[in-house]
Amino acid sequence: MTSRTDPDPTHPDPTATTPVATLPIDTTPTATDATRCPGKSDPGCTGPPGEACGARTPALREIKRWTVADRIPADSDGLSLARSVTEYARGRGKHFLPERMLVGLSGVRRRHAADRPFLDAFLDCVLDKHEGRFWNRSYLALPVLELLMDRRHTALSADRMATLLVSDVVRFEIAAAGGSREGPARGRPDPATLGTRLRHALRFVSQGLGRPDGPDAGELPSRRTPTARPPRLDEVADRLPRPPAAAVWQWFHVTVQPVHVLHDEYFFIRALQAHEMLFTEAAADMRAVIAALRRGRTEEAVERTDRAAATVARAAALFRMVATMRAEQFSAFRQYTLGASAIQSEQYKRFESLCGVPRVPRLHSAAFLNVPAVRAEAEDPGHDTVTRARLDLHGERAVGPAERDRLDAALGRLEARHQRWKSAHRSLAVRMLGDAHGSGYTDGVPYLTECLGNRLFWQLAPNT
C-alpha cells in the first residue's frame, strides 16, 4: 500500500520538473472535495460542509469487521484498521468523526486491543476527544511514536526520529504540489510559501543527517541556490531518509490525525512531534551530563552539554518552518485543539528539571501543574540535576579550576541557546496568536513573555 505522504509511483508527477519557486499550486477545493457528500444523506453526519457522510466507507466496514468478530487472528495487529480510520479522519477531521464510528472503535479497543500494543496506542489517540481526555500527547500521537522508538523495535534515536518526521513533511508537501487529493488538502500553500517551507524543512533534515551518529547528508539540498538545473521534486523526495523497513514501522504513517481538513495542520503536527523528539534527546543528554559529572569526567560532560545546546538550536530552527503556516489556517483549526497545548509537553519540562529544579513559583505554576508526573520527579528529594552535580564539584579536588571553567562555559552556551529558543517561540506566538489565549488555557503571549525570565541554571549564576 502506498503511503499517503509519498507520490504515487504509478502516476508520474506532472510538476516534477518545475522548480519549487515557480510551482503552480491549486489552492482552491477540488471538484471532488466540493461534491463528495450529496445532501448529507447520513442524518448522524456532523462533519464540515462538503465532507463525506461516511455511510459506506472502508473505515466503517473495517470497524464492523473487528466489532462483530468473536476472534481476530493473532497475527492481525490492527494496522489495516488504523489505516482506514486515519484516511477517514484526514478527509473530514478527527473532531468531526461520527458518533457511531467512535462507539465502534471504543468496542474494538475494549475487546481486541489489550494484546495489541500499537492498536491500543493508536485508539488511545483517536478516541481522546470522544472520551473527554484530549491533550497534547494524544493530539500528537506520541504513544505510537514512543512505541516505535522502543528498543525492542529499533535503536533509532529521538534526534533521528525528528529528522524522519520533517522528511515526511517534505514528502507530504511534494505530494500535494503534485496534485494529490488525499486530505487534509484544503488551502494548499502558494508557490512562494511552499518554497520557503521546503527550504527550512530541507535544511533541518540536512543538519540532522550530518550529525556524528547519522549518515552523511551527501547531496541533499538544504536551500535553493542557483544551479544549472534545479533539483526536481521527485529527486528531492528520493534523497530523503525513510523510516526503517521493518513491518512495524508502517505505524509511522498513521501518526497524523488532524482535527480539521486544512492543509497546514499536517505539517504543524509533524513540527510539534519533532519538537518533542528533540527535547527527548536533550533530556537524555542532561542525564548523560549528570552521570559524567558524578564520575568526575568533566570533558565528557562538556561534550554532552554542547550536544544538547545544538539540539535546542535545532528546535529553535523548527520555528522558521512553522512560521510559514498561514495565520488564517491556524486560527481556523486551533478552535478544535482547545485542551491540547505545548504547555503539556512532558519532555520539555523534563529537560528543564534535569538542568536544575525550577524556582518554587514556576514549579507551582500551570507550566508544571500540566505535567504532574514530571513535577513529582522534580520534587522528589532524590532527584539529581546538572546544577546539583555542578555544585558538588566544589568539593572535588580531582577537578581543577580550568575544567570547571570549561564546564561553566558550556552550560552558559546551553543557557543562551535556550533563551533564543524561548524568544523564537514568543515571536511566533505574537504573529499567530496576537491577543488570543493559548489552547492550554494560558494567557498566550503574556505567558511566554513571563517565561523569558526563567533560567535553566539559575542556582549557578553568575557562573553561567
Image (tube, grey):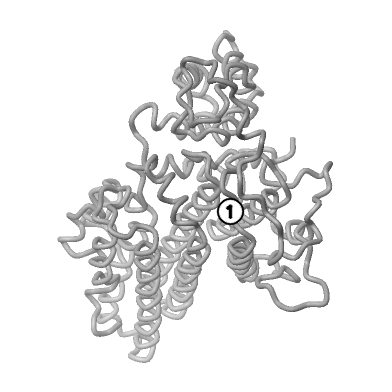
Residue depicted at x 43% and y 45%: 332
Residue sitting at x 45%, y 55%: 276
Q: Nearer the viewer, residue 36 or 77?
A: 36
Point out the residue furthest to the bottom here: 402
From the top left corner, tell me how far across and down residue 25 is, in percent.
Answer: 67, 54
> Relative to 337, is 440 on the left or the right?
left
Q: Nearer the viewer, residue 283 or 218?
A: 218
Q: Which residue is mark 1?
A: 165
Residue 282: % across, % down: 44, 64
Give the residue type that dot 1 points to: Leu
Image quadrant where one finds the N terminus: top right
Across and down, in percent, residue 447 comes to 25, 61
For the C terminus, give its image quadrant: bottom left
Question: Mark 1 falls on what kind of element?
Answer: helix
- Reply above or below: 303 against 427: below
Question: Which residue is pictured at 58% across the width and 19% down the height?
Answer: 60
Where does the image place residue 432, in percent across and percent down from the top left? 39, 59
- Label 1 neighbour load within 10 Å: few <14, some 14-19, many 20+: many
- Against 431, residue 156 (above or below) is above
Query: With respect to residue 44, does 1 lie above or below?
Result: below
Give 246 or 14, whichever is nearer the viewer: 14
Judged left or right of residue 420, residue 237 is: right
